[in-house]
Image: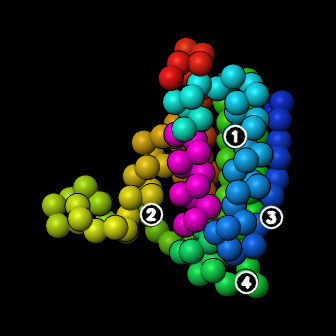
Amino acid sequence: MPRTSWSWTAEHRLPSDTQATSTAVADLLDYLQSTGWSDREVFGIHMAVEEALVNAIQHGNKEDPAKSVHVSYRATAQKLRIEITDEGPGFRPSEVADPTCGELLCEPHGRGLLLMKAYMSKVEYLGRGNQLVMEKRRSRKRNAA
């Protein structure tokens, strides 16, 4: 597999507090906007990253202040890669119930994975399920709303 030469990288170690995500998210959004990603892409990436970080903090680390979440961003002109790793026990995404199924439609849980898959080009859990890799390939249209 060819190595990617990333034009931008950033890393953050966040405490297990959902209020701590704002700096890491702002860093990413600043990059996306400064390099001309479309409003639609920025919105979707923002939603996916926020959801992933909150899941890592709340479900992965159980908001344990002794644990942290590691976030890394890598980008080229055409691709963004996001890796989020929590210190929790992990999970099996295949065992998460489909929130679009009848009796689950009104339940408030389970929509995060669905949102991430809808907005990102690739969503993959590695290892024991505590490391998330998401990628977004840039659309050919620039600055489309």
Q: Position of residue 122 (x, y in %)?
A: 53, 42
Residue density around tag 1, few if under 14, some if 14–19, many if 20 or more, within 10 Å: some
- Kind of residue sitting beneath label 2: Pro
- Mark 1 or mark 3: whose residue is earlier in sequence: 3
Residue density around tag 2, few if under 14, some if 14–19, many if 20 or more, within 10 Å: few
- Mark 1 or mark 4: whose residue is earlier in sequence: 1
Q: Which of the two residues, 62 or 93, is positioned nearer the viewer here?
A: 62
* Residue 1 visible, this angle: no
* Residue 134 visible, this angle: yes
Gap between marks 1 and 2, in whole Å?
Answer: 27 Å
- Mark 2 or mark 3: whose residue is earlier in sequence: 3
* Element under disc 2: helix
* Element under disc 1: helix
The circle on residue 93 is 2
Q: Which of marks 2 and 4 is in front?
A: 4
Gap between marks 1 and 4, in whole Å?
Answer: 26 Å
Gap between marks 2 and 3, in whole Å?
Answer: 24 Å
- Mark 1 or mark 2: whose residue is earlier in sequence: 1
Q: Which of the two residues, 60 or 41, is positioned nearer the viewer here?
A: 41
Query: What residue appears at the point 54 percent right and 75 percent down from the top-left corner?
Result: 59
Is 97 left or right of 137, judged from the image as shown?
Answer: left
The reply to whether dot 1 and dot 2 touch (C-beta < 8 Å) is no
Residue density around tag 3, few if under 14, some if 14–19, many if 20 or more, within 10 Å: some
Residue under numbered circle 3 = 13
The circle on residue 65 is 4
The reply to whether dot 3 and dot 4 touch (C-beta < 8 Å) is no
Gap between marks 3 and 4, in whole Å?
Answer: 13 Å
Tally of marks: 4
Q: Where is residue 132 in the image (x, y as percent from the top left)?
A: 60, 57
Residue under numbered circle 1 = 29
- Kind of residue sitting beneath label 1: Leu
Q: Give the range drawn in magenta.
A: 44-55
